[in-house]
Amino acid sequence: MRFAGVDPGSGTYAIATVDELGEVIDYFEVPTNVVEKDALRLVKYVEDERPYLVAIPSGHGLPLLSTRELTEKEFGLLALADPWGAGHLRSFLRAAKMLNGFTVPGVVELESVPEARKVNKLDMGTADKVASAFFYRTMMENFVLLEVGTKFTSLIVVKDGVIIDGYGGTLLPGPSSPGALDGEIAYLLCRFSRITKETIYEGGNSDLTVALALAEYYSRKLDVPIVVSGKRKWEVPVGVKMEFKFKEAAVGAALIANAVGGGIMRRYVEMLKSSGTPLSHVRLKGWEEVTSSIETYWSRGMVQFTS
């Protein structure tokens, strides 16, 4: 049997196919702008691989839902934006319903992460970061994964074979993201302007001081190695760095499909035990209004968010 995984990069979508033994048997990339304009073409490429099961791009993640179960509400939860708006992820998700596929959870949905670490957090690491961690999990049981990309920086902590903590691309400073917002700044923006996707995806800081401090803290505390991945990994002065001819997240997603589909990687499937949604752990005053609006508007086919 063949298993496929898709990594939704900002520049390219990477598609990997593995066999029952987890060996990579095919890999290719498609420009992301092509996916946004013609997602059906990419779905056809994936279908041509004849996979038994596909781990689809899952944004902020949902716990192993079949593509047949996905509605506009789930599209919105995965992208955290209006499900009917433009965007390569939403375009692909609509087209992917014809695949025998499933969603991959984000870090915040994983049951191995203690509840206390999830409170008032959402972006602890998107589904593609879980896929990258799964890829390295097939090589080692304990590590800190520091991913340093061209736009975002993230960190995933793996202990005893499961993810126990994470910091996503909008929590850590990165080339595109300013990182976690000061509460007073968030208040003033909402009072006199507004917070949009551009607010959290622009005005970044390439300095790696915060990310390195966190990685080294966990490495010392847990006595585990730091693994560094991403296009900017050679800028990082510490950690183990490996070279591959593919994106780790794409192959990791294919290995997740192998695990869920009963292949050799099923020995690691416990790493994927998950529940809830990206919105399940926010406890801030007024958050119930947000979730109620999402339920009302996304379920009824009405647009509520402005990106």
Image (spheres, grey):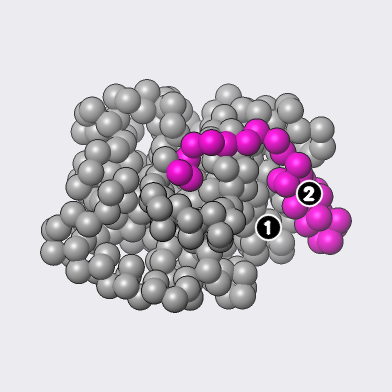
Q: Is residue 126 left or right of residue 230?
A: left
Res. 150 visible in picture: yes
Q: Residue at x 22, y 28 (%)?
A: 38
Q: Nearer the viewer, residue 16 or 158?
A: 158
Q: Residue at x 59, y 47 (%)?
A: 179
Query: Label 2 sits on what residue type?
Result: Ala
Q: Is residue 253 above or below residue 284?
A: above
The location of residue 284, given as percent across then percent down, is 47, 73
Q: Residues within 10 Å of mark 1 (few under 14, many from 20)?
A: many
Q: Residues within 10 Å of mark 2 (few under 14, many from 20)?
A: few
Q: Nearer the viewer, residue 270 or 204?
A: 204
Query: Label 1 sits on what residue type?
Result: Val
The residue singled out by tag 2 in the image is 213
The span shown in magenta is 199-226
Q: Residue at x 57, y 29 (%)?
A: 150
Secondary-structure class at tag 1:
strand
Q: Nearer the viewer, residue 25 or 271?
A: 271
Farthest residue, direction front: 192
Q: Residue at x 28, y 44 (%)?
A: 90
Secondary-structure class at tag 2:
helix
The location of residue 193, given as percent across then percent down, is 39, 49
The residue singled out by tag 1 in the image is 158
The location of residue 214, given as percent across then percent down, is 75, 52
Res. 276 visible in picture: no
Q: Is residue 282 magenta?
A: no
